[in-house]
Image (spheres, rainbow, N blue to C red):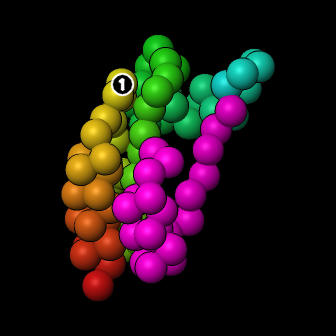
């Protein structure tokens, strides 16, 4: 999610952002989506991986900025 507050949080907390491009056929992205529980490999889909190796926090479909910030806070706090 490209929002100023999210980008600030990401920079401040050394979060690594990755994006899977499904514009064209992308078997690696489809496999990861399936592994994360998105068996239809549909987008939008968001996964936040806590730094402590805990279970990913996932969202399918549209999410709000606050949903993302809350999930990032949870992911970072589990690593503290």
Q: Nearer the viewer, residue 52 or 61?
A: 61
The foreground one among 20 and 12 is 12
Decide if residue 22 is on the left or right side of residue 13. Answer: right
For residue 41, side relative to residue 77 (left or right): right
Q: Position of residue 25 (x, y in %)?
A: 75, 19
> Is residue 13 visible to us here?
yes
Which percent across, then down, holds residue 44? 46, 27
Residue placed furthest toward the top: 40
Residue corresponding to mark 1? 61
Query: Which residue: 31% across, 47% down?
Result: 65
Vertical relation: 65 (above or below) 60: below
Q: Is residue 24 left or right of residue 34?
A: right
Check the image and name the residue furthest to the bottom: 80
Q: Is residue 68 magenta?
A: no
- How packed mark 1 is, by other alpha carbons closer than 10 Å (few <14, some 14-19, many 20 or more), is few
Q: Is residue 49 in view?
A: no
Q: Position of residue 79 (x, y in %)?
A: 32, 78
Would you identify the image quadrant in which residue 20 lies? top right
The answer to whether residue 40 is above or below residue 54 is above
Furthest residue in direction front, as rendered: 4
Give the quarter of the figure containing the C terminus. Answer: bottom left
Q: Which residues are magenta?
A: 1-21
Q: In the rendered image, which quarter is residue 54 located in?
A: bottom left
Residue visible at 77% across and 19% down in the picture: 24
Question: Where is residue 10 shown, x and y percent of the image?
Answer: 46, 68
Number of numbered discs overlaid on the protein picture: 1
At numbered mark 1, what does the secondary structure look like: helix, strand or loop? loop
Q: Residue at x 29, y 57 (%)?
A: 69
* Residue pictured at 51% horizontal, 74% vertical: 11
């Amino acid at each position: 999610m490209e929002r100023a507050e999210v980008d600030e949080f990401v920079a401040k907390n050394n979060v690594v952002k990755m994006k899977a491009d499904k514009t064209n056929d992308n078997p690696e992205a489809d496999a990861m989506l399936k592994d994360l529980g998105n068996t239809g490999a549909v987008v939008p889909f968001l996964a936040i991986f806590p730094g402590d190796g805990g279970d990913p926090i996932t969202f399918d479909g549209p999410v709000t900025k606050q949903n993302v910030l809350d999930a990032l806070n949870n992911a970072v706090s589990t690593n503290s």
